[in-house]
Image (cartoon, helix red, strand yellow):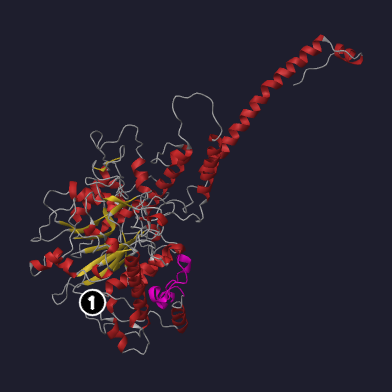
Amino acid sequence: MYPRRTAVDESAARNGTTSITSRRRFKRLDLWAASVCPLTCLVFQLELLAYKVFIYDSGTESDESHVHGVQSVLRGGNDGSRADSPYQQQPKDEAKPQQQQHLEHHKKKGRHKESIPNNQPTSVAQPTLAHESSLSYEPTKPFRRWRLRVARAKSNENSYFWNWVEPEKVIPPNNSTDLPPAIAYVTTLTRCSSKHRGSLDGAAVLLHSIRRNSYGWIPMHLQSSSSSEDFDPSLWPKYGGEGGRYRYKAYVIVDPVASPKNNAKSGDCARYLQSIGWTVLHRPPLVPLFEISPKDRGAPFQPSATFAELEKAGYVGVQRPKSGATALGPGEHPNKLRMLMYNDGCCGYTELLKLHSYGLVEHELVVHLDFDSLILRPMDDLFDVMLGNQKDDKVANSLSIAKLPLSKPVNFSRPIDAAFTRDYNSVKSPNRNSPVGYQGGFLIVRPSLTVLERYRKILQRGEFSLDPRKGWGNKHGNFYGDVTFQGILPYYYEDIAPPGEHNELELDRCTYNQMADNPRQSTHKFPRATPLDPKIMGFSDRNKCRDGREDCSDTDCQRTHPKDSITTHFTFCKKPWDCSPGLPGTVALETCLGLLSEWYGVRRELEDWWLLPRNNPGEGDESGDISNNQRSFYWHERTVNTVLQKRKGSLQPDLYRGYCDATGSSGYHNMMDPDGLKK
């Protein structure tokens, strides 16, 4: 490799001189070294770059903790809403997944480099990493490609689950002429982890609020009068609890990730819900989010009927028009819509499991509620009108109906197919003509397989305009949850359904699905209640209503007393299992504390009911539904003592009923599991 020394070179070395030949040869050596060193540096840089790419890609196929970001594992709780939710901010101290840490590490490096001034002239401003992260998802960006791979893998995993699990058949209720119709109450469960234990308490309290306002319920003061237990009725709720005119059946639709068939802890939530009276239903997506990728099946593969149906359905957007106003926009990545649906709102694409409410044709009416909802009083009058059972027009005229710019006239001479409330708080640019989504935590429908199939067609066509974001059919978008449940509902009823086929009803949102929201816009970037002192709170109301009207005092839900509401939804007032202080410093404080007090009262009554001695099956049950039997869930002495101990919280016992030591989830006392669950 190195030049050999000749005899002339040796003689010159002894004499202390260098020959011309030697100098020429060492000059060639210097040139060789100068060419090798840059090549070595280049190889090193390439290896370093490959290592960085490996960091991004490693583990993404198996790491499940970061798939949905910070989001609600149990749909029905917004306790894990995304940071850009209009209802909640993302907790700053939450542990971050490993992949997210890698991503933020490289973002910081990018920002550090950008802080160095660049004196080179440029004709186009280059976007920074921080700027890119605020834009809509683009799968072509290198540092986000791993998200697309994870989304595909999860969609595939969901599809193959249905090759060995078939959806359960719903057992029709006893429709004897001696009994009133049974209303189906439905909620959804999409994830399960220990941090969402509070949402399970929400499911238990919600179920009891349904039970105590339905046919066959014996008022608690009558049940406890024959018991030796020492109960305090003043700690029970103030409203409802006298039963109702309609029976009930409670269902929870579960995602495969949270299926009770999973032996791991991810199935514990569904098993708990089963033990307290919810009926679990497995339901596949109407259309897979991504195309089903073939697996190395080894042995001969015989697909189930459900799996074959999913393969036939294709994937979201498979039938999207190639031209026209709803076609894929110029430069729009084909996976952009699917990734937006995957990450949308609290629960992503699984939010559309709610559409299976339309498939419960064994019931005349289906009510979908989130876990963070509560029924204060029976909805019997509304059910009468929807089923056409009202005796006279007085019942229909007594209903609290919305009379807003987007509200349609209702024909009470025929049955009503859907009842809903709109989410005016989710609109980004409120005005009189802005599209407004249906609030996703409350929906009452007359089930129909025809309607369910139409929703499947909507997803297959995927006609959601993104650039600009005009939404479904170029009309329904640019609000929270627009790509999934809250956007697809108005798109169907207002654009897809044949004219005159449906008779839908928009309800007064202060009476039904009451969220104690402010009808006026706020100077804050998110909707906020009216402050008592704007200087202290740092924001104030604008002189503009969120529905575009000049006067919106008729929908001032933040000032609506709980006695005037029928159902409530804990969004702005925060979650009861977080020992919410309400909304201090605002006019909504009194309303929120009243609603929260009712939730804790229903929990207290539920626990007292579970402490009552067990009846024989059928005893005291007038509804034909065993779930209304008086029965003891707490019978072990150790469990009873723990239940009583959990009622000794020090934070405002008259409001929180002893279930809180401090505000925040850490100060909340969770409910005890039923003893039957431990057998």
Residue 48 located left or right of residue 123? right
For the image, the number of numbered tags is 1
Residue 644 located left or right of residue 380? right
Seen from this angle, which residue lies furthest right? 15
Seen from this angle, which residue lies furthest top? 20
**Residue at left offset 18%, top offset 50%:** 405
Q: Given the image, on which type of amino acid does mark 1 rest?
A: Gly
Secondary structure mainly formed by the magenta segment: loop
Q: Which image quadrant: the N terminus?
A: top right
Structural crowding at the residue carrying mark 1, measured as other residues with C-alpha within 10 Å and reported as few (<14), some (14–19) or many (≥20): some
Q: In this view, does 50 lie above or below 384?
A: above
User: Is residue 620 located in the magenta-colored stretch of the structure?
Assistant: no
Segment tinted magenta in the rendering: 650-679
Disc 1 target residue? 243
On the image, the x and y values in percent for residue 50 come to 56, 36
Foreground pick, 425 / 50: 425
Q: Which image quadrant: the C terminus?
A: bottom left
Residue 164 located left or right of residue 463? right
Determine whether the residue tagged by mark 1 lies in a helix, strand or loop: loop
Q: In which quarter of the image is residue 214?
A: bottom left
> In the rendered image, is residue 210 in sight?
yes
**Residue at left offset 42%, top offset 42%:** 134
On the image, the x and y values in percent for residue 610 come to 36, 79
Foreground pick, 378 / 629: 378
User: Is residue 656 located in the magenta-colored stretch of the structure?
Assistant: yes
